[in-house]
Image (cartoon, rainbow, N blue to C red):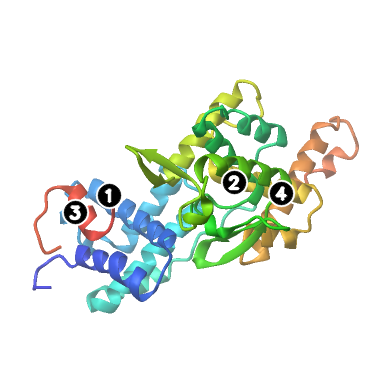
Amino acid sequence: MKAGENSLFPLVHDYLKIYLPKQRNVSPNTIRSYRKALEELLDYVKDRKQISLGEVTFEYLTTDMILSFLEYLESGRGCSVPTCNTRFAAIRAFMDYAADRNLTLVANLNKLKKVPFKKPNNTVTVDYMSMMAITAVIGQPNTSTPKGLRDQFFMILLYDTGARVQEILNIKLCDLQLGHLPKVTLFGKGRKTRIVPLMEKTVLHLKKYLLVFHPDPASATDLPLFYSVTHGEKHPLTPRMAQYILQKYGEQARCICKEVPEKVHPHLFRHSRAMHLYQGGMDLTLVSQWLGHSQLETTQIYAHADTEHKRIAIAASTSQDNPLYSKLNSARYTISDEDTLKKLTGLR
């Protein structure tokens, strides 16, 4: 860097393109989360200061500005407290990296580190679908067509395994074992792996799917299990495409089942599977292992949410004059194109 040059974007580039993936060996999903946090922050600063993206410097990334950004996420965008804390953690990690390479940023970093993460409220809410809603959504695809067959099995596997959507999209043929005890190996957050058993009916759907999409699985074990075909070429399904599939069939299912929520997304299937397992009597420790949670405390939300669900049901069925009712609620270049700048620095 030469004197007077903007050091922000070169450091953003090195952080996202070199430091995280090559030196820290961070997973692509984590890098994607950090990139999103930085991109949203820089766009926010640009809009607040009425300047171009290329004019944003570290001088604008003050603690007050970052806190204003977090407030905007919560109040203006409706983001949850955990989401805001995740963005804050990513921003603080980058500022820590930058301060190691630019001593003039240390004072601002120390001030930023004194800001605590916000505590979420005590209300535990877990959005999940009833079994009737799940059945209605999964029943929408036209399985007489290859695309419908793929879409239905994708949703079946997503629900049966309780996996994160990226874990499903990462599955390759070699990750499936269809022997005496059918199972699939999932690669989750932090490069952790876990083995999840497959139910008998899921295996039947899987075999039908393989006959159409992988008629010779032994010759291409490294191929992704789910893919789309564009101009004769196979491409792995993307998270965006997965979201589109679920939302599409969710809207169709809502016409016949009012229990289907307005927004059907991949993580809703994960929450639904976890709640159904817990409500069916599975021990919370096993549910935690099934979901791939590193800490049992993370899984406790299903126990708390189920308790709250029961409380609401009891309250709804108890008359107001019941005596128990009262007890129920106990850069180096000048770039004018901002998209190009984001691509060069790793923000896109």
Contact (Cβ within 8 Å) of mark 3 with mark 1: no
Quarter occupied by the N terminus:
bottom left
Question: Alpha-carbon distance for marks 1 and 2?
Answer: 34 Å
Question: Alpha-carbon distance for marks 4 and 3?
Answer: 48 Å
Check disc 4 and report the residue beneath it.
Answer: 199
Residue 156, quarter of the rendered image? top right
Check disc 2 and report the residue beneath it.
Answer: 158
Disc 2 packing (10 Å; few <14; some 14–19; many ≥20): many
Give the number of the disc on residue 341: 3
Relative to 157, 318 lies left or right: right
Answer yes or no: is residue 223 visible: yes
Does dot 4 land on a helix, a strand or a loop? loop
Disc 4 packing (10 Å; few <14; some 14–19; many ≥20): some
Does dot 1 land on a helix, a strand or a loop? helix
Image location of residue 281, percent across then percent down: 82, 51
Relative to 324, 123 lies left or right: left
Disc 3 packing (10 Å; few <14; some 14–19; many ≥20): some
Q: Nearer the viewer, mark 1 or mark 4?
A: 4
Question: Alpha-carbon distance for marks 3 and 2?
Answer: 37 Å
Check disc 1 and report the residue beneath it.
Answer: 43
Pick the residue in front: 64 or 313: 313
Q: Which of disc 2 and disc 3 is earlier in sequence? A: 2
Q: Judge whether 29 appears above or below 136 on screen.
A: below
Q: Which of disc 4 and disc 2 is earlier in sequence? A: 2
Q: Amino acid at mark 3?
A: Leu
Question: Alpha-carbon distance for marks 3 and 1?
Answer: 12 Å
Does dot 2 land on a helix, a strand or a loop? helix
Image location of residue 305, percent across then percent down: 70, 48
Q: At 56% from the left edge and 46% from the top edge, which residue is drawn? A: 267
